[in-house]
């Protein structure tokens, strides 16, 4: 199997006044193409910072990130953005839907901006897969949290990404709704053959992936393969 994400020697610090805060230190790991992979740890362990570096949304003080065969920090910002648009999908805890667009538009407009033909048809198909065919013309404010996250799922898979980053995908949902969203996420991911990287503090969720990376205090504690998924 080929590696779709390779992280080597990442260090990230922030300066606050006269103090320097180290958020990540000597982080190295890789993710195989098509793998399900989770990064877990308590609040403040550096998970979200690591996600931003993996996706090229932020730059490290030291270290390299190779994503889909590209060294991210040898690319300029526009080139990194183009790579994300083409290869990367995102799911966030707070859904990040555009409030002035309907469910259908939230999924189809990004496709239209990329010049995809039949964007609306593709969006309808995805929304049907996540059980929202009757809510196409509802705005986010008219949808429940679970429905909003299902729209976000459809949008994340709309550009057939090579890799999908899910940051606390059930963080704002109750247990039952969260379970339904996770089942959909794994079903869509398996069907699309996407590489899935989940960032979470939820060990039960992490144990449903093939590999678990544990962070604490900005450093890797363990990196273990899950034997049964």
Image (cartoon, grey):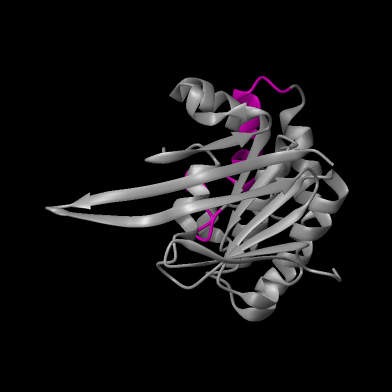
Stretch of the chain drawn in magenta: 92-116
Where does the image place residue 101, in percent across and percent down from the top left? 53, 42
Please name the residue shown 37% across and 40% down the image: 61
Please name the residue shown 74% across and 70% down the image: 180
Is residue 207 rendered to the left or right of residue 77? right
Nearer to us in this view, 133 or 92? 92
Where does the image place residue 76, in percent across and percent down from the top left? 45, 21
Where residue 123 sits, quadrant-wise, is: top right
Using the rendered image of the protein, determine whether residue 116 is visible from the camera's viewpoint.
yes
The N terminus appears in which quarter of the rendering?
A: top right
Nearer to us in this view, 143 or 82? 82
Nearer to us in this view, 129 or 100? 129
Please name the residue shown 40% across and 67% down the image: 44
Q: Is residue 67 above or below residue 173?
A: above
Where does the image place residue 19, in percent across and percent down from the top left? 17, 56
Using the rendered image of the protein, determine whether residue 58 is visible from the camera's viewpoint.
no
Q: Is residue 95 magenta?
A: yes
Where does the image place residue 106, in percent across and percent down from the top left? 59, 42
Q: Is residue 74 above or below residue 158?
A: above
Nearer to us in this view, 196 or 220? 220
């Amino acid at each position: 199997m080929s590696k779709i994400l390779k992280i080597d020697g990442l260090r990230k610090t922030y300066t606050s006044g006269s103090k320097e805060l180290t958020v990540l230190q000597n982080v190295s790991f890789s993710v195989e193409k098509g793998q399900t992979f989770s990064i877990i740890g308590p609040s403040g362990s550096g998970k979200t910072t690591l996600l931003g570096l993996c996706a090229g949304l932020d730059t490290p003080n030291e270290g390299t990130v190779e994503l889909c065969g590209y060294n991210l920090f040898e690319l300029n910002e526009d080139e990194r953005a183009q790579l994300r648009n083409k290869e990367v999908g995102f799911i966030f805890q707070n859904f990040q839907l555009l409030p002035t667009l309907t469910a259908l538009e939230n999924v189809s407009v990004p496709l239209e901006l990329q010049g995809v033909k039949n964007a609306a048809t593709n969006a309808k198909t995805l929304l049907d897969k996540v059980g929202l065919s009757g809510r196409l013309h509802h705005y986010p404010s008219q949808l429940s949290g679970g429905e909003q996250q299902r729209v976000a799922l459809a949008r994340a898979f709309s550009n057939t990404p090579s890799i999908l980053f899910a940051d606390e995908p059930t963080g704002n949902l109750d247990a039952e709704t969260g379970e339904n969203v996770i089942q959909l996420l794994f079903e869509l991911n398996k069907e699309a053959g996407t590489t899935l990287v989940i960032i979470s503090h939820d060990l039960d969720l992490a144990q449903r992936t093939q590999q678990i990376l544990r962070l604490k205090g900005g450093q890797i504690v363990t990196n273990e393969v899950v034997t049964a998924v």
